[in-house]
Image (cartoon, rainbow, N blue to C red):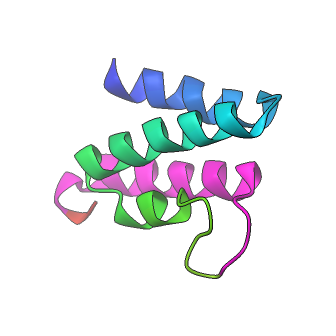
Amino acid sequence: MFLSEVDLAIKDLPLATDHQTTLERLHFIKGSALNLGFTELASLCEPNNQDGQAVKPADVEACYLTSKTTFFADPRSA
């Protein structure tokens, strides 16, 4: 159930119509990512991530899918 909520938040991220909604969705995704041990995804969800670039929804989704695949292959590696 937890992952399905994150799946939905990831899919809804590009649909945000204002900056505040985007920040709220990123905050939710970041918190969820930290709970799952997806540290790379959490870092990517910072409003100005480590590269100083704006968050791109496609990058967030790609990182999430990679993290989730790795998690299911070996939950200890997440």
Disc tally is: 0
Q: Is residue 53 left or right of residue 28?
A: right
Residue 52 falls in image quadrant: bottom right
Residue 47 screen position, x and y as percent = 60, 59
Does 28 lie within the magenta span? no
**Residue visible at 35% across and 57% down in the picture:** 38
Predominant SS along the magenta part: helix
What is the residue that sits farthest to the bottom in this orientation?
Answer: 51
**Residue visible at 44% across and 56% down in the picture:** 67
Which part of the image, by quadrant, shows the C terminus? Answer: bottom left
Residue 74 position (above or below residue 35): below
**Residue visible at 54% across and 64% down in the picture:** 44
Residue 56 falls in image quadrant: bottom right
**Residue visible at 32% across and 46% down in the picture:** 72
Residue 26 screen position, x and y as percent = 55, 43
What is the residue that sits farthest to the left in this orientation?
Answer: 76
Residue 69 or residue 53, whichever sits in front = 53
Residue interval drawn in magenta = 52-76
Residue 73 screen position, x and y as percent = 32, 53
